[in-house]
Image: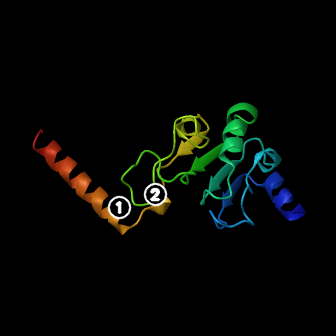
Amino acid sequence: SPDNDRLLREADVVVLTVPGTGHASTAGLVNRTSLLLMRPHALLVPVSAGPINFGDLEAVLRDERPKQRAVIDTWPGGCWHYPNASCGPPLGPPDFPGSPVLARLPNVLPLPSLSMRDAAYWRSAADSVARNLDALANSK
């Protein structure tokens, strides 16, 4: 819409908080066209993966807009590098759009789906930290 285009052209930070996977009205909302409408130095913070064309995001951030940035906590296939996480399966192979190739770009801050973690994950993480601190304290 014209209002969305204007917003993209004028905003320094775009936080996308629309419904994710399974919502036809938001699918592909972030694509090459919308990314190129954004300011060259803009920051994109998507809260759900469904609206993002990760192939376009990777290509634009890598090749066309190296000063544009993204903080990505949502990944197309689930949790990045956390195969036993309760928020979904890990991503596909390294060349899959939205994979660690995208995460290694200098203008991307990758997060491991922290927003999708549940209470079981955080209990497990706390137990792991406690075991590591105990091992460190006991020089193991």
- 83 horizontally vs 110: left or right: left
Q: In this picture, is 135 found above or below 105?
A: below
Q: Secondary structure at mark 2?
A: loop
Q: Which residue is mark 2?
A: 88
Q: Quadrant of residue 41?
A: top right
Residue for point 90% across, 62% down: 2
Place of residue 20 in the rendered image (x, y in percent of width and height, measured from the top left): 63, 63
Crowdedness of circle 1 by 10 Å Cα count: few (<14), some, many (20+)? some
Q: Quadrant of residue 36?
A: top right
Crowdedness of circle 2 by 10 Å Cα count: few (<14), some, many (20+)? some
Seen as rendered, the residue at the extreme right is: 2
- 104 horizontally vs 139: left or right: right
Place of residue 120 in the rendered image (x, y in percent of width and height, measured from the top left): 33, 66
Place of residue 129 in the rendered image (x, y in percent of width and height, measured from the top left): 25, 52
Kind of residue at badge 1: Tyr
Q: Which residue is mark 1?
A: 121
